[in-house]
Amino acid sequence: MLQKRKGLRNIKRLQSASSGERSRVGGRVSTYRLYCLDGAGKITLAEWLEADDDADALRKAGERSDYVSCEVWDRGRLVGRVPARPAR
C-alpha cells in the first residue's frame, strides 16, 4: 500500500507541474511541451519548455530544432510548428 501511495503522490506532482503555469520571481511562466519529430512524423524527443508566452516558447523551440522539426503544445492546444534548420 505504501508503494501505491508514493506512485499517486508522484502522479499528482507531475499533474500539478504540467497544469499550465508555475510562478517565478517577477511574474508567471507557462509550461509548454516540446515534441521533436523525425522525417516520418514520429516523436523522437519530448521535453518540458518554460516560456513567458507562446511567442517565447516558439523562439526557444527554434533554438533547439537543429535538423528536426518540432511542435510546441500548451496542454491540448498546438501553439505552432517549428521547421528543421538546415545543416550549416
Image (spheres, grey):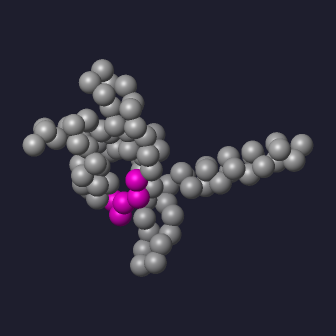
How many numbered dots are placed on residues in this image? 0
| Residue at 65% over, 54% down | 13
Comparing 68 with 73, the one in front is 68
| Horizontal side, residue 87 vs residue 14: left or right | left
Q: Quadrant of the N terminus?
A: top right
| Residue at 68% over, 46% down | 11
Magenta stretch, residue numbers: 49-53
Q: Quadrant of residue 43?
A: top left
Looking at this view, name the residue that lies furthest to the top.
40
User: Where's residue 50, x and y in %?
Assistant: 41, 58
In the image, residue 24 sits, relative to residue 45, either above or below, namely below
Comparing 17 with 86, the one in front is 86
| Residue at 50% over, 69% down | 23
> Is the magenta region chiefly helix, strand or loop?
strand
Q: Quadrant of the C terminus?
A: top left
State whether residue 54 appears in this view. no
In the image, residue 69 sits, relative to residue 60, either above or below, namely above
User: Where's residue 76, x and y in %?
Assistant: 45, 40
User: Where's residue 26, x and y in %?
Assistant: 42, 78
| Residue at 74% over, 51% down | 9
State whether residue 8 appears in this view. yes
| Horizontal side, residue 21 vs residue 9: left or right | left
Q: Quadrant of residue 7?
A: top right
Assess whether residue 14 is covered by the magenta stretch: no
| Horizontal side, residue 24 vs residue 55: left or right | right
| Horizontal side, residue 87 vs residue 41: left or right | left
Comparing 35 with 66, the one in front is 66
Looking at this view, name the residue that lies furthest to the front.
88
Looking at this view, name the residue that lies furthest to the left.
88
